Image (tube, helix red, strand yellow):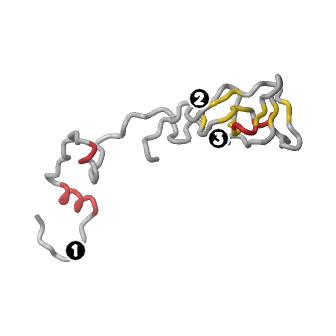
Amino acid sequence: MHHPTGALISLEAALATLLSGVVPVPPRSEPLDRALGRVAAAMPASLPALPLRDISTIDGWACRSLDLVGASPYSPLALSTPPVPVEVGDVMPTGSDCVLQADLIDCSSPIAFAVGEAAPGQGVRRVGEDMTAHRPPGS
């Protein structure tokens, strides 16, 4: 150890002196309830996007939003493809991008009529909305 002389030493020398004899703490597993305030020894494995598929967040009819443009109670719109009933948590059918509330589709005749519009993504939790793929949680 050098005696203080008032002269400055290089950063490398200071770090070498400070870190001499310091060794990393070996990693160990801890239960989740005792992990608060600790540092992860490694990044978790990359995870897939969550949710894995588009899912419904409301009960109603899975539709394609472009098919609903202009629909209203005063101007019902005949749907070229029948809407698919979905409940909360159901996987969205292929080709549909929104969920219309149950009372906004009239299925009382052989042709289904929409009496309301929906924006793309309305009533839907999209792929990766909760967590993006290949990124650690919280980033």
For label 1, count other residues whose C-alpha is less than 10 Å away and answer few (under 14), some (14-19) or many (20+).
few
Provide residue 54's location: percent of width, then percent of height.
60, 33
Q: Which residue is mark 3?
A: 123
Which of the two labelled residues, at mark 1 and mark 2, occupies the earlier sequence position?
Answer: 1
Mark 1 highlights which residue? 7
Q: Which of marks 1 and 3 precedes in the sequence?
A: 1
Question: Would residue 82 appear left or right of 91 to someone viewing this image?
Answer: right
State the residue lying farthest toward the front.
108
Q: State how far apart marks 3 and 2 are (Cα).
A: 12 Å
Q: Quadrant of the N terminus?
A: bottom left
Q: Please, what is the three-letter code of the amino acid marked with disc 3? A: Gly
Discs 3/1, front: 3
In the image, farthest residue toward the right: 75
Q: Is disc 3 placed on a helix, strand or loop?
A: loop
Q: Is 9 rendered above or below residue 81?
A: below
Q: Residue at x 58, y 30 (%)?
A: 90
Q: Position of residue 100 (x, y in %)?
A: 71, 38
Asked if labels 1 and 3 touch by Cβ distance under 8 angstroms, the answer is no
Please tell me which residue is depicted at 78% across the width and 42% down the height of the picture: 117
Marks 3 and 1 sit apart, C-alpha to C-alpha, by 69 Å
Q: In the depicted view, which residue is nearer to us: 117 or 9?
A: 117
Badge 3: few (under 14), some or many (20 or more) residues near its Cα, within 10 Å?
many
Residue in the foreground of this view, choosing between 108 and 51: 108
Distance Cα–Cα, label 1 vs label 2: 70 Å
Circle 2 sits on which residue?
Answer: 91
